[in-house]
């Protein structure tokens, strides 16, 4: 099952998927005037430096920078919860007068003031994956977390016979993704009268804590037959809990992303489905958007990047392999 959303500037979804085949994911199209571009220096600041997902964003940004003759400096906190360090990084990048900033915000409200200050100084900001609220950045490129999670919910509910109970393990309630994914999953489930909501626990981006929270929910509510882990570590925690309780096949596990071992769990059927994003594409297109801005060209305020729901049935298809390679560059299927 593939569902992709896009704006016209991205070309067709099919074209994007095909473009992802090379160089760890592929190059997204862009119309920036590259031939006469000066040498821009951009700063890429992600939520953390501890995940292959963010390294895929970096790879995409580096590839675009090479094409346009720019330089991308990459930095990120060691932890996805070190908000103070990320704010300092944005402020320092602005103080050093870089030509543009690419930001994956840890917190949608706390990063508004630093972004606002950068833009006041004439430094354009493009957000990727996790935006800010209100969205005052020049452009925001991301998966539609609400739409993709809603689609995922409908898919796994069908696997559960559209009847039963579900619960969610989220990674935080501060980031835009941590807010949107549970919201989307619940929206998708709300369209299915036979599914009831038990509740949500927070795993704080920790696999052991996510496992413990999932165990507690499953032991307290034996009626649960669907559980959603809202990011990689959350999904791995849910999968571990289901295995420990010998409920593989009895509890349908849904996840988001696949950079820390989820693919093997999808292949084995422990995880029934996971939303995979296009992080390489986000990084690539973000650089192209910044170059357009520097050339005084209009850029879209919001771009919904493609995603794919990967399952045991489609995990080895060419389309799935192209998405997985963005998380696992050496993956062959």
Image: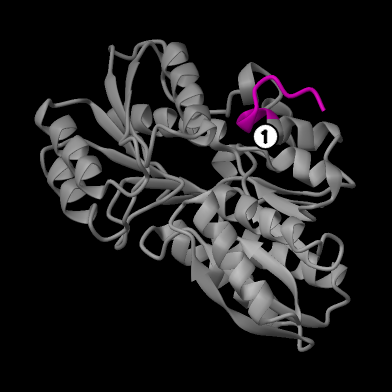
Nearest the viewer among 299 and 106 is: 106
- Residue picked out by circle 1: 16
Nearest the viewer among 53 and 151 is: 53
In the displayed structure, does residue 100 sit left or right of residue 142? left
Q: Which residues are magenta?
A: 325-333
Residue 218: within the magenta?
Answer: no
Q: Quadrant of the C terminus?
A: top right
Q: Identify the residue at horizontal 19%, vertical 25% (top origin).
A: 98
Q: Dot 1: within a 10 Å radius of its alpha carbon, few (fewer than 14), some, or many (20 or more) residues?
A: many
In the rendered image, the vertical position of residue 34 relative to residue 17, given as above or below: above
> Colour scheme used in the picture?
one colour
Q: How many marks?
A: 1
- How far across and how far down the image is residue 13, in percent? 70, 42
Q: Using the rendered image of the protein, determine whether residue 143 is visible from the camera's viewpoint.
A: no
User: For numbered disc 1, what is the local secondary structure?
Assistant: helix
In the rendered image, the vertical position of residue 249 relative to residue 199, given as above or below: above
- How far across and how far down the image is residue 217, in percent? 62, 74
Quarter location, residue 93: top left
Residue 329: within the magenta?
Answer: yes
- How far across and how far down the image is residue 197, in percent? 64, 83
């Amino acid at each position: 099952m593939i569902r992709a959303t896009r704006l016209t500037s991205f070309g067709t979804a099919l074209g994007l998927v095909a473009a992802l085949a090379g160089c760890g994911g592929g190059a997204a199209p862009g119309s920036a005037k590259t031939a006469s571009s000066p040498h821009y220096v951009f700063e890429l600041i992600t939520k953390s430096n501890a995940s292959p997902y963010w390294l895929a964003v970096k790879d995409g940004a580096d590839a675009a920078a090479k094409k346009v003759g720019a330089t991308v400096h990459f930095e990120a906190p060691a932890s996805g919860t070190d908000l103070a360090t990320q704010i300092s990084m944005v402020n320092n990048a602005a103080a050093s007068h870089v030509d543009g900033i690419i930001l994956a915000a840890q917190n949608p409200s706390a990063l508004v003031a630093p972004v606002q200050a950068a833009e006041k100084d004439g430094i354009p900001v493009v957000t990727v994956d996790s935006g800010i609220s209100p969205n005052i950045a020049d452009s925001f490129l991301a998966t539609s977390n609400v739409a993709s999670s809603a689609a995922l919910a409908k898919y796994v509910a069908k696997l559960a016979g559209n009847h039963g109970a579900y619960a969610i393990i989220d990674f935080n309630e501060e980031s835009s993704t941590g807010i949107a994914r549970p919201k989307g999953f619940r929206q998708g489930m709300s369209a299915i009268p036979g599914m009831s909501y038990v509740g949500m626990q927070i795993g704080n981006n920790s696999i052991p804590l996510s496992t413990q929270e999932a165990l507690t929910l499953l032991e307290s509510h034996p009626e649960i037959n669907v559980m959603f882990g809202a990011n990689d570590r959350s999904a791995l925690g849910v999968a571990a809990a289901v295995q420990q309780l010998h409920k593989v096949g009895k509890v349908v596990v849904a996840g988001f992303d696949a950079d820390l071992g989820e693919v093997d769990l999808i292949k084995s059927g422990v995880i029934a489905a996971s939303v995979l994003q296009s992080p390489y594409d986000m990084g690539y297109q973000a650089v192209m958007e910044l170059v357009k801005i520097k050339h005084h060209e209009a850029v879209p305020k919001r771009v919904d990047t493609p995603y794919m729901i990967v399952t045991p049935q489609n995990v080895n298809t060419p389309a799935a392999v192209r998405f997985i390679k963005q998380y696992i560059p050496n993956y062959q299927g």
